[in-house]
Image (cartoon, grey):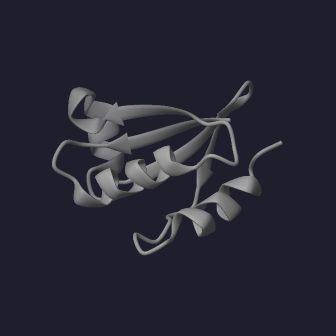
Amino acid sequence: MKLILYSKEGCHLCEGLEEKLREITEIPLELEIRDITTNNQWWEMYQYEIPVLFLATETGETFIPRISPRVSVSQLTKILQKYHK
């Protein structure tokens, strides 16, 4: 399962979500971090929304609705299992 996390340095919510994603062991995850400060289009789209998470598939990217920063690793795993095939 490949995930794309739109983030930026110094974003505590982004860092928290990334940390929890890296703690998941029940699903094989490949995590790509995209720094929105390196791309004007990403900045315009996500500057007020980060962290933003997408599932990358062969047919494109599927938006994963905002995940609460209070979510536990086990709850996050259950959310992602809905997207895992």
Q: Tell me which residue sits at (67%, 54%) in the image.
A: 80
Q: Which of 64 and 41 lies nearest the eye of the viewer?
A: 64
Farthest residue to the right: give it. 85
Number of numbered discs visible in the structure rendering: 0
Residue 83 position in % (x across, y down): 74, 50
Using residue 33 as the reference point, say whether residue 83 is left or right of it. right
Q: Tell me which residue sits at (48%, 44%) in the image.
A: 22
Q: Which of 57 and 46 lies nearest the eye of the viewer?
A: 57
Quarter of the view holding residue 20: bottom left
Q: Tell me which residue sits at (27%, 28%) in the image.
A: 39
- Is residue 81 positioned above or below 35 on the image? below
Residue 11 position in % (x across, y down): 22, 53
- Is residue 62 positioned above or below 49 on the image? above
Q: Quadrant of the N terminus?
A: top right
Using residue 64 as the reference point, say whether residue 15 is left or right of it. left
Q: Tell me which residue sits at (57%, 49%) in the image.
A: 24
Residue 64 position in % (x across, y down): 59, 54
Using residue 72 as the reference point, say whether residue 50 is left or right of it. left
